[in-house]
Image (spheres, helix red, strand yellow):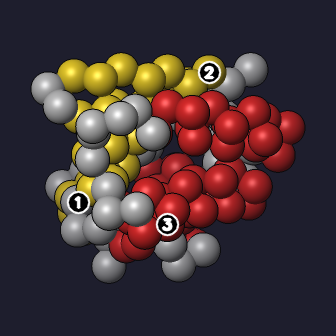
Amino acid sequence: MTTVIGNVQDSINRINILGNIEMFEATKIRETLWELAWVEGYTDVEIDLENVDYVDSSGLGVLTSFVVMLRKANKKVTVLRAKEKVIEVFHLAGLDKFIFGDQKFLGRRHE
């Protein structure tokens, strides 16, 4: 079971995802992300993936569309602390730079 937790701190809306982001949970995750992202008055959103062990193609779609919509709404979006195996899924799909930008991972950059 996947849990999504929102926490507003230091003028940043922080969203933590705990568990896998996959087809079975995609609808619930999408709905919860949208509820948490639109906290009034906050334009910065951080998505913490530290506790995500697995992302499938449905999860790629959920996170990518979420980031796209937030950026279109002029929100600054940062995806943080993803594990190497999660980053690799985004890399294989050609989405790692779009999702993670120029962040450094484990002492190297994804290029």
For image coordinates 57% across by 33% down, the residue present is 35
Amino acid type indicated by mark 1: Gln
Residue at far right of view: 24
Return the x and y of residue 96 as percentages of the image width and height: 44, 68
Tags 3 and 1 touching, CB below 8 Å: no
Measure the C-alpha gap from mark 2 to mark 1: 25 Å
Q: Quadrant of residue 15?
A: top left
Q: Quadrant of residue 71?
A: bottom left
Amino acid type indicated by mark 2: Thr
Q: Tell me the mark number nearer the camera, choosing from 3 and 2.
A: 3
Mark 1 crowdedness (10 Å alpha carbons): few <14, some 14-19, many ≥20: some
Where's the C terminus, which quadrant? Answer: bottom left
23 to 3, vertically: above or below: below
Which residue carries the number 1 mark?
Answer: 103
Q: Tell me the mark number nearer the camera, choosing from 2 and 1.
A: 2
* In the displayed structure image, the side of residue 31 where residue 64 appears, left or right: left
Residue at far front of view: 40
Dot 2 or dot 1: first in sequence order is 2
Measure the C-alpha gap from mark 3 to mark 1: 18 Å
Where's the N terminus, which quadrant? Answer: top right
Which residue carries the number 2 mark?
Answer: 3
Dot 3 or dot 1: first in sequence order is 3
* Picture disc at residue 68: 3
* In the displayed structure image, the side of residue 7 where residue 18 appears, left or right: right
* In the displayed structure image, the side of residue 61 where residue 58 appears, left or right: right
Mark 2 crowdedness (10 Å alpha carbons): few <14, some 14-19, many ≥20: some
Q: Nearer the viewer, residue 106 or 29?
A: 29
Q: Nearer the viewer, residue 20 or 43?
A: 43
